[in-house]
Amino acid sequence: MRIDLRPRTVLIHLALIATALVMLYPLIWMVVSSLRPGNEIFREPGLLVKDLRIENYRAGWNALTEPFTRYLLNSAVVVLGSILGNLVSCSMAAYAFARLEFAGKKMWFAIMLLSIMLPIHVVIVPQYILFSHAGWINTFLPLIVPKLLATDAFFVFLMVQFIRGIPRELDEAATIDGCGRAGIFLRVILPLMVPALATTTIFTFIWTWNDFFGQLIYLTDPHMYTVPVALRSFVDATSSSSWGSMFAMSVVSLVPVFLAFLLGQRFLVKGIATTGIK
């Protein structure tokens, strides 16, 4: 393999490496700080650890009213429910927009696209009132049930574009074989949507796992806290005396996101690259 050593290419690669190091520095600093004594965290801007403190992880795990395992499990329940809801509802809605004909189809599709630009802060108050009357406050239901109604328009649009790239001849062949609309969706379209479904799964996982605002609004009992809300409480509970423990739990909370992206990167790239290609 021949290496391109032209000055322009070398400078571009050096600039990219320098930019990557600058972007990664805060993350690396957080990991290093989770292994430092509390009184050295903000005193040492470098990345060299002189006094290794593994006990920061043990102290952080049990620093709050519940072990950190509880918050990880709570986040896992919300994430799994959200993923299942988005996969089922968004794929069905996308199939309807891409393949079925019904009154006002273009209008409803346009409204769906417009909802992408609607900030969550506009609807959070009426949603809170609705869920409060339903008795869902301090439960996981407000965070999961809306996903079953295809409320994430971005994923609906992503899947619509992907389904439009699937030849209609496959639908016609399935119809000749005796499949109805449901059969075509389950036996033809859905198996071919694996890249789009994988992309939806990864994005839903990352966005839901990192969501703070919605979970802070609806979850008030510390026993129900998810990881982002627990980390906020961690700062409130320990103030400035246990920054090492807080950074340690922040590193723990990043591990599932890192693994999800690492394991699903191939499907993520394929899903985005093939969306909308005829």
Image: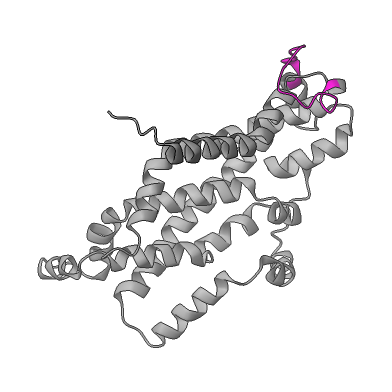
Q: How is the image coloured?
A: one colour
Question: Which residue: 50% across, 34% down?
Answer: 259
- Secondary structure, magenta segment, majority class: loop
Q: In this view, does 104 lie to the left or right of 251?
A: left
Location of residue 210 in the rendering, given as x and y in whole percent from the top left corner: 63, 46
Spot the residue most to the top.
51
Residue 79 colored in magenta in the image = no
Task: In the rendered view, tell whether residue 159 sits above or below residue 34.
Answer: below
Q: In this view, does 249 lie to the left or right of 82?
A: right
Quadrant showing the C terminus = bottom left
Instruction: Give whichever of 164, 26 is nearer the camera.
Output: 26
User: Which quarter of the picture shows residue 55?
Assistant: top right
Location of residue 239 in the rendering, given as x and y in whole percent from the top left corner: 89, 34
Residue 50 colored in magenta in the image = yes
Spot the residue most to the bottom.
103
Instruction: Give whichever of 173, 41 is nearer the camera.
Output: 41
Question: Which residue: 31% across, 82% down?
Answer: 101
What range of the chain is rendered magenta?
A: 40-56
Task: In the rendered view, tell whether residue 244 sits above or below residue 157.
Answer: above
Instruction: Give whichever of 77, 11 is nearer the camera.
Output: 11
Q: Is residue 26 left or right of residue 9?
A: right
Quadrant showing the N terminus = top left
